[in-house]
Image: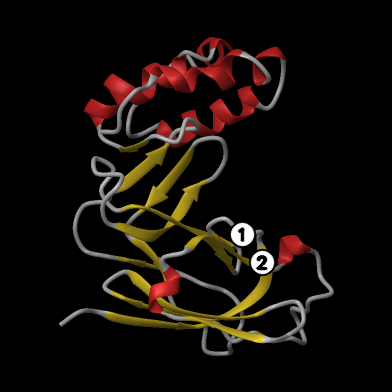
Amino acid sequence: MKQLLIIFIMAQFASLTFAQSKNDLDYILFYDQDTTYCIITMIARSGGNVYKVEYYDVNQELHKVKKKETKQIESMRVAGRTLDYIPLNASKPNKYQRHIERKIDGRIKIYDHIRLIAETDKDGYRQLYSVVGAGAEIYTIKLDNGRYYKIKSSNIKKYIAPYMKKCREFNNSFKDEITRQNIEEAVIEYFDMLSTGFYANNFCLLIGKYIPIYL
């Protein structure tokens, strides 16, 4: 039997209103559309797949996104946590996709396949927590050239580390060998290097074309 997870986010308008900054609101981004800032009140999942989303727009009008339409949601943020629609298997980027949570955001993104958003606390406040599934941890990295890779030692050595090291500023700053244990630290350092200096606007932003395939 497929696991069924229904996430009710009890939107307490007294504490979270549309008068707040966009940064405090949820959002839904459909492919080829502008970002819709909103308050998401429910996400329903089955077997890890999102099949229903309900949200209020800035006019406080209720919208219901049903199963077929959920696949058109490129990205959504709920209670400060972002889920993107990405390949479930990095080696088959054009195959099966799922909404998976970003663990590390930035020019390079790391996705955590194990941690799932779950229901809010018993008082209905917009605080979500993680449910850790059984089995080994699975992480996917998305480089800033749009390529996806499963984070494992062979991919780090052959693809991920060489890609990041092409950025001279990062290479001069991060002297350690990039491994599964320190890759999050490396990604954050890489973002910092791209955010400042000459290479932020030149070499570091052009290296993507040298990585030709998905693995």
Viewer-nearest of labels 2 and 1? 1
Q: Which residue is mark 1?
A: 33
Question: Badge 1, how many Cα within 10 Å: few under 14, some, many 20+?
Answer: few
- Residue 36's tag is 2
Cα separation, mark 2 vs mark 1, equals: 9 Å
Question: Measuring 72% from the left and 16% from the top, which residue is drawn there?
Answer: 197
* Residue in the foreground of this view, choosing between 75 and 179: 75
Q: Position of residue 154 (x, y in %)?
A: 22, 26
Left-right relation of 159 to 109: left
Do the CB atoms of the residues marked 2 and 1 lie less than 8 Å apart? yes
User: Is residue 120 something one can see in this rendering?
Assistant: no
Question: Measuring 30% from the left and 47% from the top, which residue is drawn there?
Answer: 94
Left-right relation of 178 to 155: right
Q: Quadrant of the N terminus?
A: bottom left
Considering only vertical position in the picture, is 181 above or below 29?
above
Considering only vertical position in the picture, is 158 above or below 134?
above
Left-right relation of 192 to 86: right
Q: Which image quarter: residue 57?
A: bottom right
- Residue 174's tag is none
Question: Measuring 45% from the left and 73% from the top, which residue is drawn there?
Answer: 69
Q: Position of residue 128 (x, y in %)?
A: 51, 72
Residue type marked 1? Gln
Question: Looking at this rendering, what residue extends furthest in the bottom direction?
Answer: 123
Residue type marked 2? Thr
